[in-house]
Amino acid sequence: MPTVVGDMRNLPLADPGVPDSRSPGRYLWWVMRGQQATLLGGMTFGTIWMVAQAIMPALIGKAIDQGVANGDTSRLLFWAGMLLLAGVVQAAAGIIRHRFAVMNWLMGAYRTVQVITRHSVKLGATLSKRVATGEVVAIGTADLAQIGNALDVYGRAAGALISFTLVSVILLRASVTLGLVVLIGVPVLLLAITPILRPLQRRSMTQREQMGELTTLASDIVGGLRVLRGIGGEDVFHDRYARDSQRVRMAGVRVAKIQSLLDALQVLLPGLFVVVVVWLGARFAVQGTISVGELVAFYGYAAFLMMPLRTATEFAQKQIRALVACRRIVKVLSVEPEIVDPQDPQDEPGVGDLVDHGSGVTIRPGILTAIVSEPPEEAAAVADRLGRFTDGNVTLAGVALAELPKDTVRRRILVSDTGSMLFSGRLFEELDLRDSGNEPRIDSALRTTSSEDITEALPEGLDADVEERGRSFSGGQRQRLVLTRALMADAEILVLVDPTSAVDAHTEARIAERLTDHRRGRTTVVTTTSPLLLDRADHVTFLLDGNVVAQGTHKTLLETEPRYRWVVTREEDQ
């Protein structure tokens, strides 16, 4: 017990282990092996709990036959005491069994959360490309419960199996006929229910997939609600969400139809079984084959057997639902990152040029370089390659990024793109992700991004709580706070993708001026078409169809490169 209690208090686990994701069954078995001590504990006390209840009819029968029928008060008191002892044991074992059940539920759920979170971090940008948001959200909500429920039921399932065997042996000793009825009848009842389980699994899987799709749609609508209102698209997406939610509802109804039939059979079939057992027992009692106490005991056994039967079908249902959940979990775990560490990494290079050989972009150390491209997405693609979020022939001081560990690349090169968002939590902690606790630095970063007005408007300032995705802030405020967070990281090489696209011209001018001073002497890359930022850049690179066609200062390119002038002034006119 001390070890188990310690494990429970130390959730999340220090090391969840490496999951076996080859199949849903293997994953569930891996989770079980990771907490076999608590599973065995739950099964042990679950068995004691149910066996103590299973022997009560026998104790009552003995009290009737030896105490009441014979008028022996001492024997009656003895068997009454044994019945009390069995009740106390059952109560104590039930408490401990429930404690183990909760432990198993929590540990299975936490283990899954940890492996999914760890794998999500490993996947990085690959996750959003390969797995829908709704799938990940559904794993963190519905699927965790199914894993926990599957582990929770093992204690009672073990008790049901052992107690069923014990009752069968007792009945066989008292009456071979009744014993055989139980031994044969219970498996037959379970087999009668089995054909329903496969369609239940299939329909549950369909419902689970549709719920994931609906969650993704809801997340997209919430994230783009401001834009939808701006273009009058709320009704269109409302209708789409209503239509899809009806599909999910109908899928749930189809699952419920099977589930209701299964629940009805769980009551009907065991009920009929009890009637048969009691009827046979009554006939044997009338014939004198068994005593009155044994008849009472047989009735108690028949009523008790409903519990193992219901537990067995509950066990089957929860295992099916858990396997459906594991199928989704395994799907996420099977996704491999697009970028992997080299088998033989090179030594970390010193300071030098960062070069994207595919486009010809060269980033010299210690200066602010701006990248302008037509079409605009080509600049963002270059930024992804420079940060090694996609494959490309990129070198740092002559060493290919592909030959360096990802951790080294991430530590030295930080890319902050337009998809960057704020997470829920205290604002100070959101901006100071490296936990430096340096208030002067954060004040400097806030000033650089002209964000002092944001914090001053908050009653709690930097101690204010940020809502999910920073929804309480406007688009321009979120962009400035994201830029503040990027500056707080103080990366050796900072790549900013359209960092001022959502702010007004006056604010953008202040940011352009202050960014140059804040990053002076360090390598900074900005992809933009803003004349305010371009005018402050030390060097500007112009890409056309993904290749460098001109380089120089903003002023020089305006004078010598018509295509550059058209791209920049067109944006300015808009």
Image: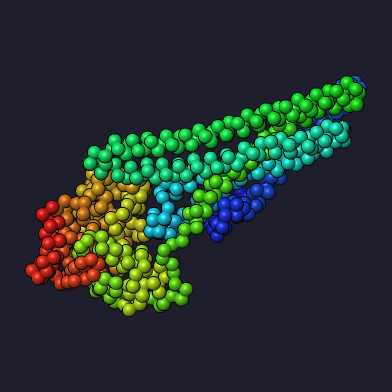
Give the residue drawn at x 32%, y 74%.
396
- Looking at the rendered structure, the number of numbered marks drawn on it comes to 0
Picture quadrant where residue 219 is located: top left
The answer to which of 251 and 436 lies nearer the viewer is 251
Classify 163 as above or below 537: above
Percent coordinates x, y for residue 512 in the rendering = 17, 60
**Is residue 473 among what the camera can see?**
yes
Q: Is residue 408 left or right of residue 569?
A: right
Residue 173: x %, y % from top left: 87, 36
Asked where in the image residue 498 lies, by quadrant, the reply is bottom left
Using the rendered image of the protein, determine whether residue 7 is visible from the camera's viewpoint.
no
Query: Image height check: is 140 above or below 484?
Result: above
**Seen from this angle, which residue lies furthest left?**
559
> Relative to residue 264, is residue 445 drawn left or right?
left
Residue at 57% x, 47% y: name it.
323
Residue 113 sits above or below residue 313 on the image: below
The residue positioned 40% from the left and 78% from the top of the image is 347
Q: Please tell me which residue is depicted at 68% across the width and 41% down the height of the picture.
A: 157
Q: Is residue 6 left or right of residue 190?
A: left
**Residue 341: percent from the left, percent from the top?**
44, 69
Q: Position of residue 524 (x, y in %)?
A: 25, 67
Q: Specify whether 2 is left or right of 480.
A: right
Q: Is residue 223 above or below residue 342?
A: above
Q: Quadrant of residue 74?
A: top right
